[in-house]
Image (cartoon, rainbow, N blue to C red):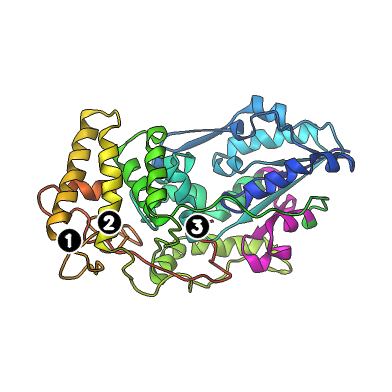
Amino acid sequence: MAHLILHIGSHKTGTTSLQTALRKSSKSLAAHGIKVADRHVDNQGLVNTTGRQAAFQATLRPQVAEQLLRPDAETVVCSNEMLFWLHDPAEVAHLARMISDRFDTVQIFAYLRRQDLLVLSHRKQIVLGRVARDFYGSDFLTLPEPEPFHRLFLDYDAKITQLWGGAFGTEAITLVPYERESLIGQDVVQDFATRMNLPLGQPEKDRNAPLGAAELLAGLAFDALGLPHDTVRPILQNVAERFPDDSRKILPTQDEARRFVEYFAESNARLAETFSHDGQPFGFSDDYSAYPEIDTPVWTSQEVMTLLRTVVPQAHSLPGKPARRRNKAAAEGAQGAMTTEGGENPARGGKKKGAGAGRAKGAGKGAGKGPGQGRAAGKAAGKGQGKGKGAGKGKGKRGGATAAAETAED
């Protein structure tokens, strides 16, 4: 009897810590008849992604799946959050058929994070040029305006109940909210080990640190300008050095976060009708106190000038197409406008609109179309050439931390 435990994510729910624990415990697990899916196979290559935003597609790589999911132990454990990108029923059905041919039983396991928290945490992957950038795009700083294609990833009822439940049966699926009070020992490794009855080692501190506010702002701007990520990373490192211990967070307001989650409220309610957690209908905390109630300035003009002086000269040295060079010139125009109008006082986004990137919510035109929809700094900079609009009207936030949302950018 071969049993498969398939952990499918989702993203930003401690998957790196869990996979590290599985890898380090592989020998002790083997002594109990448990094998971690072959780490010599390109685990992250299990799913291929193409296209951006509404054209985004995710497909299974059958050859990788066949190498990875082999029933050569009494229990096989595979953790791969890339599977959560799949949204075509035919792809998941193909995987289910392959697994049923090889294993006698299967347990699908997933941690789910409230949608606003997942997107906020995913911004680091956008900056680093990961798959998240192709899915979300980079034209926002806090939360994007909800679009129909977002449901491919963030509609949990469609993803879990219909897609995975349709292929494997909902009875084969275990869901846990990724919230500290819902995790056994308030730790994802201990929680997974206990629920799946696996002898894993002691959990390690998560080393997947979030980006500082300045790195995030610069990274999203560079992505909006279309600059290659491999050449941008050294600049982001310089930004991190110029802004050490940057613990500021660029967050939406409480109302903006609520509105974003409301877009998925019906889906979350349907999910609760099918799945439970610890004897209660599955659901997320409704605590939004980690976010500010109103927009709060987090940047001074001096800090904005420091950021621009760090990134603009280095951007000039990057190879780029003419359009990119024009964007760099526009960024220079924004810098000149800020030098003319900006002062040393904290930017308030009021009378002195040019006094820095006033509020970190869009180093440019401002709130955009919807919740947190401040246009990314790169596009905003283009508006600043010669008119002083470049980095002055955006709004930013600073928030505290609570059990429900304290890991918003982990």
Asked whether disc 1 touches disc 2, contact meaning CB atoms under 8 Å apart, the reply is: yes
SS assignment at label 2: helix
Q: CA distance from mark 1 to mark 3?
A: 30 Å
Among the two numbered marks 1 and 2 on one chain, the one whose residue lies closer to the N terminus: 2
Asked whether disc 1 touches disc 3, contact meaning CB atoms under 8 Å apart, the reply is: no
Residue at 65% of width from left, 55% of height from top? 205
The disc at residue 409 is 3
Q: Where residue 178 sits in the image (x, y, percent)? A: 62, 60
Q: Amino acid at mark 2?
A: Val
Query: Given this view, does label 3 or label 2 mark the residue nearer the observer?
Result: 2
Residue at 39% of width from left, 69% of height from top? 253
Among the two numbered marks 3 and 2 on one chain, the one whose residue lies closer to the N terminus: 2
Q: CA distance from mark 3 to mark 2?
A: 22 Å
Which residue in the protein does label 2 denote? Answer: 304
Give the magenta range.
167-193
Question: Can residue 5 be seen in the rendering of this structure?
Answer: no
Q: Amino acid at mark 3?
A: Glu
Looking at the rendered image, the quarter that the N terminus falls into is top right
Query: Given this view, does label 1 or label 3 mark the residue nearer the observer?
Result: 1
SS assignment at label 1: loop
Q: Is residue 190 magenta?
A: yes
Q: Where residue 225 sits in the image (x, y, percent)? A: 29, 40
The disc at residue 342 is 1
Furthest-top residue in this view:
63
Q: Where residue 32 sits in the image (x, y, percent)? A: 89, 43
Q: Where residue 299 sits in the image (x, y, percent)? A: 31, 63
Q: Amino acid at mark 1?
A: Gly
Residue 249, by quadrant, is bottom left
